[in-house]
C-alpha cells in the first residue's frame, strides 16, 4: 500500500518534512504516490535548473582504457584529464562487472525496504554517525530540496560494517570497496608521479586515501523533472571520487571551454567507472588538478541509482599544497586546513558550485 500524507496540498513544508524525513519515506515515498505536480519545497530557482541551451552536444569527458595501466601513455592521459577536465571515465579497470552489478542490485534492495526499516538508519535513529539514511543534501540548510534519497556508509573496519551496515547491501558494498582499492591506488600513483611525488609514504597515504565513504544514491521518478534537480551544482570534497552509475544517465559536468557555463553529459558505459578530482586533491596539488562542478538532473520516466566511493584524507589530517609541488618556487594558493573543518563547512550549507574551496584559499 502506497504511503499517504493526507489530502492537504503539497505546499506545507512541515507536512512534507515529517513525511520524507521523520517517517523515513524519503522522496521515493513521494514519487510512489503518483504525484501529478512537484511539491513546492522541491521547486528550484530558475538559475539552478539545467537549461537545455547550456548542454554541449557531442562533447565528452575523456575515456581511458586501463588494460595496459603500466604504459606511460595511460599515466599521461590520467594526469592530463585531471588537469584539463577534472573528470574522466575508465574502462578495462579489472573490477569485475558482476561486482558492479551486485552493488547496483543491493542498492535497489535497500531502497525497496519498508520506510520503518530504512528509518532505523536515519540521523535520529542510527546506532552510529558512520551509517546514515537521508534525503536531499542538507535539508536544514537548503531553500529548495533535491530529488534524491541516499544511504551513506563511512568505512572504519569490516568488523564495524558487519555490525552496523544494513544486511541487504553490506557484503556487496564491502566487495565493491575491496575491488576498487587496487584501481584507486593505481590512479593515485599516476597522479602523484605527475606532481613529482616519487613515493607515497604513510603520511601521504593518509592524506590521499586515509578514509573512505560510500553512498548509495536513489533518484526516483519525478513528476516535473525540469523544475528541480537530482543533485545541485557542486564539487566533491574528496581526493578522488569513483562513481558507478546505472544505464539511465543524468550526470552533467561543467565544460572547460567558452564562457564556462556549459554542461556535458556523462553517458553511461557498461562496466565503466567515472573518476573525478575532489577539492582535497585540488588543494594538495596547488590547483594543478581541478575539482569540477557537476550536477544530476531528475528523470520523469525512470528511477536512477548511482554508487560513489569518496576517497578522502583522514578527518584529522591537515591538508595544504604538497611540498613537492612547491619546491620549484611555486607560490601556495591554499593555506593549511584541518580536513574535518573543511568537510563541516561543505555540509553546513546548500550546494553552491565551487564556493567551498574558497574556505582554504590564502
Image (tube, helix red, strand yellow):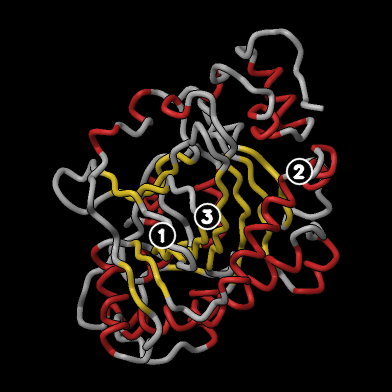
Q: Closer to the N terminus: mark 2 or mark 3?
A: 2
Measured as percent of width and height from the top left, residue 135 is found at: 64, 38
Q: Is residue 338 above or below residue 158?
A: above
Q: Is residue 30 above or below residue 264?
A: above
Is there a contact, CB below 8 Å, between mark 3 and mark 1?
no
Measured as percent of width and height from the top left, residue 267 is found at: 38, 54
Residue found at the far top of this picture: 8
Residues at marks 1 and 2, CA–CA distance in whole angstroms: 27 Å
* Mark seen at residue 1: none
- In this view of the protein, which residue sits in the foreground, 355 or 1? 1
Label 3 crowd bin: few (<14), some (14–19), many (20+), radius 10 Å: many
Q: Which residue is mark 1?
A: 279
Q: Residue at x 53, y 54 (%)?
A: 343
Is there a contact, CB below 8 Å, between mark 1 and mark 2?
no
Q: Is residue 219 left or right of residue 166?
A: left
* Mark seen at residue 246: 3
Q: Quadrant of the C terminus?
A: bottom left
Q: Which residue is mark 2?
A: 122
Q: Quadrant of residue 115?
A: top right
Q: Secondary structure at mark 1?
A: helix
Q: Residue at x 56, y 21 (%)?
A: 41
Q: Is residue 313 above or below residue 22?
A: below
Q: Secondary structure at mark 2?
A: loop
Amino acid at each position: 500500500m502506497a504511503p499517504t500524507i493526507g489530502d492537504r496540498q503539497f505546499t506545507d513544508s512541515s507536512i512534507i518534512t515529517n513525511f520524507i524525513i521523520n517517517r523515513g519515506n524519503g522522496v521515493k515515498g513521494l514519487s510512489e504516490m503518483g504525484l501529478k505536480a512537484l511539491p513546492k519545497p522541491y521547486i528550484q530557482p530558475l538559475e539552478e535548473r539545467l537549461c537545455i541551451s547550456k548542454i554541449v552536444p557531442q562533447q565528452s569527458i575523456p575515456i581511458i582504457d586501463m588494460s595496459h595501466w603500466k604504459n606511460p601513455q595511460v599515466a599521461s592521459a590520467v594526469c592530463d584529464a585531471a588537469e584539463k577536465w577534472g573528470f574522466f571515465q575508465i574502462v578495462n579497470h579489472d573490477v569485475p562487472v558482476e561486482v558492479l552489478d551486485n552493488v547496483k542490485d543491493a542498492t535497489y534492495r535497500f531502497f525497496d525496504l519498508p520506510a520503518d526499516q530504512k528509518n532505523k538508519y536515519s540521523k535520529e535513529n542510527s546506532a552510529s554517525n558512520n551509517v546514515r539514511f537521508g534525503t536531499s543534501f542538507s535539508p536544514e540548510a537548503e531553500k529548495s530540496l533535491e530529488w534524491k534519497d541516499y544511504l551513506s556508509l563511512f568505512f572504519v573496519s569490516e568488523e564495524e560494517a558487519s555490525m552496523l551496515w544494513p544486511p541487504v547491501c553490506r557484503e556487496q558494498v564491502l566487495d565493491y570497496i575491496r575491488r576498487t582499492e587496487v584501481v584507486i591506488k593505481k590512479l593515485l600513483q599516476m597522479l602523484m608521479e605527475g606532481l613529482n611525488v616519487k613515493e607515497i609514504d604513510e603520511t601521504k597515504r593518509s592524506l590521499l586515501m586515509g578514509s573512505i565513504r560510500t553512498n548509495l544514491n536513489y533518484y526516483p521518478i519525478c513528476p516535473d523533472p525540469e523544475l528541480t534537480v537530482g543533485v545541485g551544482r557542486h564539487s566533491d570534497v574528496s581526493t578522488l571520487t569513483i562513481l558507478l552509475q546505472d544505464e539511465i544517465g543524468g550526470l552533467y559536468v561543467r565544460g572547460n571551454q567558452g564562457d564556462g557555463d556549459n554542461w556535458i553529459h556523462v553517458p553511461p558505459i557498461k562496466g565503466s567507472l567515472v573518476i573525478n578530482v575532489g577539492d582535497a586533491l585540488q588543494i594538495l596539488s596547488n590547483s594543478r588538478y581541478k575539482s569540477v562542478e557537476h550536477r544530476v538532473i531528475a528523470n520523469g520516466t525512470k528511477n536512477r541509482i548511482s554508487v560513489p566511493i569518496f576517497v578522502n584524507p583522514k578527518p584529522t589530517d591537515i591538508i595544504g599544497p604538497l611540498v613537492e609541488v612547491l619546491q620549484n618556487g611555486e607560490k601556495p594558493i591554499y593555506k593549511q586546513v584541518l580536513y574535518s573543518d573543511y568537510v563541516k563547512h561543505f555540509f553546513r550549507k546548500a550546494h553552491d558550485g565551487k564556493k567551498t574551496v574558497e574556505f582554504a584559499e590564502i
